[in-house]
Amino acid sequence: MSDQIVRIHYQTTCNHGRKKTMNQKVFITLQFFVVISLATLMLSGCGAPAGSAEDGKRWYTMNNCSSCHGLHGNDGRAIDIAGIDMGFGRFVRILRRTDAPIMPFFPESKISKQDAADIYAYLKSVEK
């Protein structure tokens, strides 16, 4: 009789221990996916705001970007930016850089996030 009690107690404890371990694994896995998802959103800047290619072209022309990048972003002395294939967050970081040797930097007071989205939309729309 006492042997049966010990066996039942052992089985109950082991099952409970396994269940807890499985719950812990599921919880840790969920935490991992939540952290990765949040990090991805933060790094991507939640994507580009909707930009107007027409407004971006106007901004590009008025601010003389074509003097270095060419009329359509692909025929100037600076790097080709037509059909830009970098993410929006990286594009904005490049605009805001203060340590670029030649390209002027554009603080948010000069180019708003919406202006940047418009320019980005324009550059995406231009063929390479």
Image: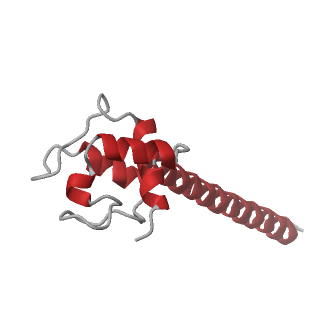
Q: Nearer the viewer, residue 89 or 53?
A: 53
Residue at 85% across, 64% down = 5
Up-down: is 8 above or below 112? below
Q: Nearer the viewer, residue 53 or 42?
A: 53
Name the quadrant of the C terminus. bottom left
Image location of residue 73, percent across then percent down: 33, 61
Up-down: is 114 above or below 82? above
Q: Is residue 57 left or right of residue 27?
A: left
Q: Is residue 127 left or right of residue 1?
A: left
> Can residue 48 be seen from the camera position used here?
no
Q: Is residue 102 left or right of residue 30?
A: left
* Residue 15 location, quadrant: bottom right
Residue at 35% across, 53% down = 91
Name the quadrant of the N terminus. bottom right
Up-down: is 93 above or below 124? above
Q: What colour-coding does the image apply? A: secondary structure
Image location of residue 27, percent across then percent down: 64, 55
Looking at this view, name the residue that lies furthest to the left. Answer: 101
Looking at this view, name the residue that lies furthest to the right. Answer: 1
Image location of residue 112, percent across then percent down: 38, 33
> Can residue 44 be seen from the camera position used here?
yes
Q: Nearer the viewer, residue 21 or 8?
A: 21
Residue at 45% across, 62% down = 126
Residue at 26% across, 43% down = 96
Q: Nearer the viewer, residue 26 or 5?
A: 26
Instruction: Report the number of discs.
Output: 0
Image location of residue 33, percent across then percent down: 58, 58
